[in-house]
Image: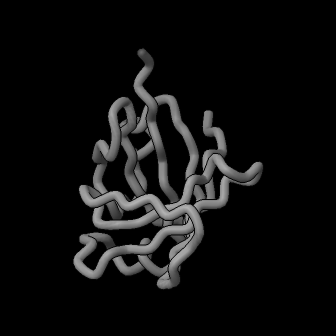
Amino acid sequence: MMKFNHLGIPTNEWFEGEIDLPHLKMTVSDHENNPFGIQWMRFWEDAPYPELVKTVPHVAFEVENLTKELEGKKVIIEPNTPSERLTVAFIEVNGAPVELMEYRKI
C-alpha cells in the first residue's frame, strides 16, 4: 500500500521559507505548509544525485516495506536515511523519478 506524501519540484531559484540541509547538500521548502504537499528543492553545486532527480519533478509515496517495494525496480538512489526514523530511495518509472519513503514506527 502506498500513500501520497509530497511532490518535489527542482528549481535553481531562491524561494520563501528555505530550509538548508547541509548533510544532503540541498535546500528545500516545507511540504507540510500547504494542503497539496508541494516542496521546492534546490540542489547545491556538489550534490551527489542523478541529473534526473535534480532536474525533473518527483512524486513521493510512503510505503510499509521499502525493501519489498524496490524489488524489480530501477533504483537510481539507493536506500538512505536522511532523518531519524525515515529511510528513502528513488526509482525511475517511465523516465520520471519516484521517491519511496518508509517511516520506522516508534
Is residue 95 visible in this depiction of the protein?
A: no
- Residue located at (54% from left, 71% from top): 96
Is residue 40 visible in this depiction of the protein?
A: yes
Q: Position of residue 64 (x, y in %)?
A: 50, 29
Foreground residue among 10 and 67: 10
- Residue located at (28% from left, 47% from top): 80
- Residue located at (45% from left, 35% from top): 102
In which quadrant of the rendered image does the N terminus lie?
top right
Foreground residue among 82 and 79: 82
Q: Looking at the picture, does residue 104 appear above or below residue 75?
A: above
The image's colour scheme reads one colour
Q: Looking at the picture, does residue 35 appear above or below residue 86?
A: below
In which quadrant of the rendered image does the C terminus lie?
top left
- Residue located at (28% from left, 81% from top): 45
Q: Position of residue 11 (x, y in %)?
A: 52, 80
Q: Position of residue 57 (x, y in %)?
A: 57, 72
* Relative side of 56 to 20, left or right: right
